Amino acid sequence: MEAVARLRNYPSSPRKMRLLADLIRGKSVESALAALEHSPKHAAIPLRKLLLNAINNWKQKNDGGDESRLYIKTIYVDGARILKRMRPAPQGRGYRIRKRSNHVTIILDAKETNEQVSLPAETENTQNTNNTETEN
């Protein structure tokens, strides 16, 4: 089952946060936590906390299941509100400063280990039929 965690209105540019989101997208939870812990970027701290919250949400949903199979199924960063400020400029003008913020959503899921693929048996049957056709 999936677990979702959201970080809303974090005062950082969405572009800066997407750099870290792209770094951990599709990885297992352990490797993503290690990457965020050793990242020098400022946005790594709230993203790591958000990932830990998503893990706890998954544990509550699945009665404390095995978290070693968890991976980041989806992570996306959206722009949030923009605070507009004015900075004094030459000749009585004012430059507009846009202070951006973002929303981050993480969806975790567990990898399925039960799936067994029966492709080798099917390929043997097709090879046998191809061999009989060439012999005739």
Image (tube, rainbow, N blue to C red):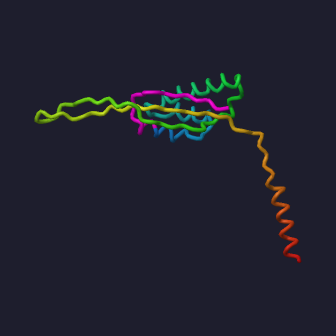
Say which residue appears at 58% left-offset and 29% top-offset. Answer: 4
Q: For the magenta stretch, what is the residue range?
A: 1-17
Say which residue appears at 63% left-offset and 36% top-offset. Answer: 71
Picture coordinates of residue 79 (x, y %)?
A: 41, 35
Picture coordinates of residue 8 (x, y %)?
A: 46, 27
Q: Quadrant of the C terminus?
A: bottom right
Residue 5 occupies quadrant: top right
Q: Is residue 58 magenta?
A: no
Q: Quadrant of the N terminus?
A: top right
Picture coordinates of residue 117 (x, y %)?
A: 78, 49
Picture coordinates of residue 101 (x, y %)?
A: 39, 31
Residue farthest front in this picture: 81
Image vertical order of residue 52 relative to residue 124, above or below? above
Q: Is residue 2 magenta?
A: yes
Image vertical order of residue 46 relative to residue 20, above or below? above
Q: Is residue 29 left or right of residue 93?
A: right
Say which residue appears at 81% left-offset and 51% top-offset. Answer: 118
